[in-house]
Structure formats: C-alpha cells, structure tokens
Image (spheres, rainbow, N blue to C red):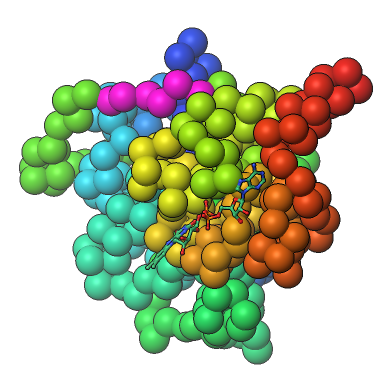
Amino acid sequence: MSTLVFVEHHFSESGEGELQKGSLGILAKAAQLGGEVAAVVLGSGVEALAAEAGAYGATTVYVADDPRLTAPLPQPRVDVLAALVQDKAFETVLFAQSILAADMAAGLSARLDAGLNWQLVDIVSEDGTVVGKQSALGDSVLVDVGWTSTPRLALFRAGIVDPVESGGTAGVEKLEVRFEEHSLAAEMLEQAHEESSGPSIEDADVIVAGGRGLGAPEGFGMIEELAKALGGAVAATRAVVDAGWYPYSAQVGQTGKSVSPKLYIACGISGAIQHKVGMQGSGTIVAINKDANAPIFDFADLGVVGDLTQIAPKLTELLKARR
Ligand SMILES: Cc1cc2nc3c(=O)[nH]c(=O)nc-3n(C[C@H](O)[C@H](O)[C@H](O)COP(=O)(O)OP(=O)(O)OC[C@H]3O[C@@H](n4cnc5c(N)ncnc54)[C@H](O)[C@@H]3O)c2cc1C
C-alpha cells in the first residue's frame, strides 16, 4: 500500500511559511492505512517547509519548488502530481479540504481517469480493501464508498482530524517539474486577502458563529471580540451572509462549509437543519438564544436562554479578565 498526501501551505504577509494544519491531519489518516506514506509540497520557496511534514508521519516528502507554482492555481500542480503519482505508482492520493485542493483533486481525477470520492470523514483498510466513509442524510449515517481502480483519490471534509506529531523525520526529494503548455495559460492577476487575524474556520479549534439574532451587521463586532478572546474564528449562517452582514466564506451549513471545531458557540442561531449539517460534528456545541424553544437547543450540549447582546460581551469580558 502506498499513499501520497498533498500538503498545502500558506505564506503570511511577512513571508513566513506554514504547512496547513488540515493536510497535516490527513497524514495521520494515511498512516492508518499502513504501508508507505509520502507527502508532497508544491509551491515557490517551499523547500525549507517540506521537511516538517516528516514530523507528522510522512517518510518521504516530495517537493516541487518553482516560481511557476507561486500562484494558487490548480493546473500546474496537476501536472506535477500526475507525473509523481504515475512515476511512483501511488495507489491512494489524499487531499484535505480547501478550494485549491478540491480543484486539484478534480483535475487529477480527469487527467488520470481516476475515481475521486469527496467529503470523506474517514478512510480505513478493511480486509485489505480501502474503504472511504462519507457522512449522509444530515450526518445521521455513515456510508461506505469505494474505488474500482487505482489510483484512488479522496478529498476529506474540513477539520475532521488533528495533526499528530510522530516525531519522525522524512527524506526530502526534489521533483523535476514539467508543465503542459495549456496548464500555464491561466494567470493570477490579483489576489485579495480578507482582513483577518485569527485562524480560518476550517482550521480553528473554537468557532463563534452569529445568526440573524445579532439584529444587524454591527452585531458581528461582539462576535469577533468573543472569538478573539477565545483564539477562535467567526462563522455565520446563510441568513446573515445572504443579507450581506458577513462574507460568504464564513457560511457554515449545507450550502456553506462543514466544520468540526472542538467548541462551537452559536449566537442568535435558530438551528435550522441546513445549518446543523455543517456544524453538528463539533466537539461541544454551546447555544445562546433568547427563545427557549429554538431547535438549536435540541442538539446543543450547553444552552443559555437569554439575550446575546447582554451575554456575549459579558462572556468576552470574563474571558479577558481570566487571562
Ligand atoms: C437549500 C437551502 C440551503 C441552505 N443552506 C444553509 C446553509 O448552508 N447554512 C445556513 O446557516 N442556512 C442555510 N439555509 C437557511 C436555513 O434554512 C435557515 O434559514 C438559516 O440557517 C437561519 O439562519 P439564522 O439561524 O441566522 O436565522 P433565524 O432562523 O431567523 O434565527 C435567528 C435566531 O436568533 C434568535 N434571537 C433573536 N434575537 C436574539 C437575541 N437578542 N439574543 C439571542 N437570540 C436571539 C431567535 O430566537 C432565532 O432563534 C438553507 C436553506 C435552504 C432552503
């Protein structure tokens, strides 16, 4: 069995690089399959970062370091991945959820005519057969999914597994890159960065989410304060992103993102099924809602019935004082 994990990275404004927590977590999943586990890091100026993947379970880290891999565009990366997967005959290729990874997985699937299962919450080896676990019917059942041929491609749901440091080291192998002409045709003209100081909702251990109960867009100010006090990220319901109160990238739910932080604090959120499916995998769910009959209290672990405009700032104040 040989498994390759695509490990994504970020660069901060100051130029400091970091491997994405979600993809390091997937290395731990790959290790559960047994056999050889390798990672691949693709970008520009990433060689120094690559070795770090060894501490999370990869025995070999392949690195393609090329200026043409600077922009987060999928096609040049598909060229490198396709050649690597074919050359080393990897049987399984795993991706953590991200916009770039989803584009790459789809591109690789088309390029290699390989099956892709997505939104997996787990992957296991059962009697020598690799089986993916996909959650369905509003997360009430787990469905087994499989592949009829290799390489098997899989894209995981966001935040399903934390990285586990194994303390190992990896051999780093530099890849020769060759690009198809059409793969370099797309050019990134501009990249806008959202102003945010905390973790992304995919990576955060704590999420504070706001809904229509905030009353107005300005209500997100107190949600941001609370999230900051907890070192967490801010999420939102579709009702408020549709109303233009908060960016779409923060939407959690059926038509937004699926998240599973350790703690999810829902403020002024009714708990509609379409929101629930995106956050019910959270470790502990705390709901603040003034309506004791709000559906969210049916699946929250802890509930506070009251006015969030009173409770949220008080909570922030207490957290700050405690620190
Ligand atoms: C096809 C489809 C896809 C959808 N996809 C999504 C999705 O991905 N994500 C999503 O979130 N929704 C989605 N929805 C919408 C979903 O059905 C709900 O309409 C939405 O989640 C409701 O958002 P909300 O909880 O913010 O608002 P509401 O349902 O209006 O709830 C507001 C809550 O705030 C409480 N409240 C009011 N004032 C206060 C106060 N001062 N203090 C405390 N509590 C207060 C109220 O009691 C109420 O429970 C989808 C719907 C459809 C049809």
Instruction: Tell how many labels.
Output: 0
The residue at the point 45 percent across, 64 percent down is: 254
**Most common SS among magenta residues:** loop
For this orientation, the residue located farthest to the right is: 322
The residue at the point 70 percent across, 39 percent down is: 308
Taking the magenta stretch, the answer to whether it contains residue 221 is: no
For this orientation, the residue located farthest to the bottom is: 127
Measuring from the top left, give residue 284's x and y in whole percent.
78, 55
The residue at the point 55 percent across, 75 percent down is: 138
Measuring from the top left, give residue 253's x and y in whole percent.
49, 59
Q: Which range is magenta?
A: 191-196
Measuring from the top left, give residue 227's x and y in whole percent.
67, 31
Measuring from the top left, give residue 88's x and y in whole percent.
41, 59
Q: Which is nearer the eye, 278 or 265?
A: 265
Q: Which is nearer the eye, 29 or 278?
A: 278
For this orientation, the residue located farthest to the top is: 14
Rendered position, 316 above or below 258: above
Taking the magenta stretch, the answer to whether it contains residue 195 is: yes
Rendered position, 204 above or below 217: below
Q: Which quarter of the image is occupied by the N terminus?
A: bottom right
Q: In this orientation, does residue 251 appear? A: no
Left or right, residue 47 beside residue 271: left
